[in-house]
Amino acid sequence: MNTQKWLRPLRRILALVVLAAFIIIFSDVRGKLPSAWVGVFTSIQLVPSLLKMILPLSLLSGLFLVLIALTLLSGRVYCSVLCPLGISMDVANRMLRWMPFLRRKARFKKAANYVRYPLLILLLLSLFSTGLFALNWLDPYANFSRMATYLYQPVYIAGSNVLAHAAAHWGVAALQAVPVNPFIPLAFFSALSFLLLVFTLMLFRDRLYCNAICPVGTFLGLLSRFSFFRVQIHKENCSQCGACQQVCKSDCINIKNLTVDTSRCVVCYNCLGACNANAIRYSAQWKISEKAVRQRDPSKRAFLKAGMLFMGAAPLLAEAKGHGANALCFWSRGVALPPGSQSLKHLKDKCIACNLCIASCPTKVLQPAFLEYGFTGMMLPKMDFQKGYCNYECTHCGAVCPTGAILALSAEEKKITQIGKAEFRPGRCIVKTEGTACGSCSEHCPTQAVHMVPYGDNLTLPEVNADICIGCGACEHACPVEDPHPAIFVVPHEVHQKAQLPKVEETTEVKNDHDDFPF
């Protein structure tokens, strides 16, 4: 009897806890979860932790090294316990087993080294030309996050709103309807295409995406060849019944040669539960056999060096040349960057386009970019003041960002971070064109950088104090002029600046020197 069967249920429990936490995060459409907790939890993903390691003075900068150490110690536990995409694939595959016509018989297959290693090398080379663009479209966490944002969250919001309207009909005010996210064709179809790709590969071979395309899986596979603990077959007990091979998700158990390809093994422990002879065990590799030394492929050392380059490539991304912020932008005014992102260069160097900031933005001012940042900036967050405005008190996007692309700002820092300055065009304002009173821009300005001054007969016209304007876009969003653009709009900075704090007018009390009232 295999004494390690308890490892499989333990792994499943931990994986389900991680997946449930991510589901809760993307179901938090009302912003009830502490944003700092969300940011810490999402930082345990490999690529975000790598980018955060480069960020100076980050308290979470050591998580990447922890994940590397975990892999060297126990193999690709990350892929089966911490990766939400991998866990989702396992859950989906488990559900498909209930359909006999979709069941497949697992068997040993050779590794797709001709795909995964060249793809990893090409990806590493692309980091120096297109930055994180290629990685953003292959990283498992970024893709899972986009699928959750643009496929799962709209369905959840629709269901939640139906319940809220039903509760209101019965006089229960506990649930409140939330605004429906705007439909973004690029974001929706890119998420849907990736879902169909992963699902198709999963039907063909369970973890084929993880072991042939995923750069994180390939990189961790290289490291897992040297892991201290690994799944091993003990010849003295094995009857070659093939039970372990039939439940292997990665098709990496060769029952004929009694070997396990550790570079593809995701340490799911299914084989341990299937073996009743205690022939396959998760144990320490105390020494390498002479046969293993003879079978070692020297070319894999080159691939390992390429994989290690993955750890050091990100600091050099600063040299990658990106497109300017004014590329293909409306009115040639540029695109406003989220507060805390500092500059387009910083955003491109750190952002993996997971869109978690977009999913959690309470005013929906953050939207995925198309070509506003250039081709390599697709799906990165931008400020769209037609959809909303940046809340003066909100610091949510920086708190949930897992990579440091949007720095976590305190409330005080946020209030003086100037992402741009409002510009007023009097010739478009309805006060001048229609002779009617307005003032919406001034009413919505949180710093009163936009204030009203006398104009004509009993009318007032907006005036902008650029020193205290932070570029939040509240004035632009509130402006009733829409075609072709508002009368007041934000001209963004390429590099964020500091605004002055608005002056607080002191009120003085009028003292009455008389003891008695004068009447």
Image: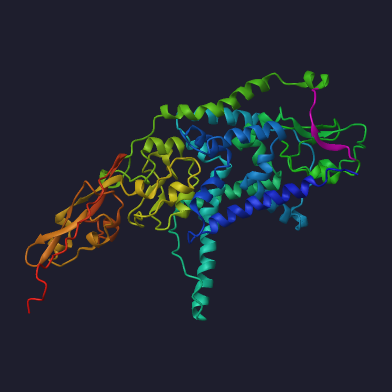
| Colour style of the rendered protein structure | rainbow
Judge whether residue 75 can be spotted in this image: yes
Q: Is residue 283 magenta?
A: yes
* Residue lying at 48% horizontally and 44% vertically, measured from the top left: 353
Task: Report the front residue among 438 and 369.
Answer: 438
Q: Is residue 419 magenta?
A: no
Judge whether residue 128 can be spotted in this image: no
Task: Report the front residue among 298 and 50.
Answer: 50
Left or right, 451 with respect to 374, comes to: left
Quadrant placement of the C terminus: bottom left
In percent of width and height, residue 382 lies at 38, 47
Task: Report the front residue among 326 and 103.
Answer: 326
Magenta span of residues: 278-288
Left or right, 249 with respect to 501, comes to: right
* Residue lying at 41% horizontally and 39% vertically, measured from the top left: 347
Find residue 298 and report its image quarter: top right
* Residue lying at 56% horizontally and 35% vertically, measured from the top left: 62
Residue 407, placed above or below residue 358: above
In percent of width and height, residue 168 lies at 49, 77
Residue at the bottom extreme, as displayed = 170
Task: Report the front residue among 453 and 386.
Answer: 453
Find residue 379 and report its image quarter: top left
Find residue 417 and report its image quarter: top left
* Residue lying at 63% horizontally and 24% vertically, measured from the top left: 303
Number of callouts: 0
In percent of width and height, residue 11 lies at 73, 47
Left or right, 152 with respect to 104, comes to: left
Residue at the front extreme, as displayed = 515
Left or right, 328 with respect to 448, comes to: right
In percent of width and height, residue 222 lies at 66, 29
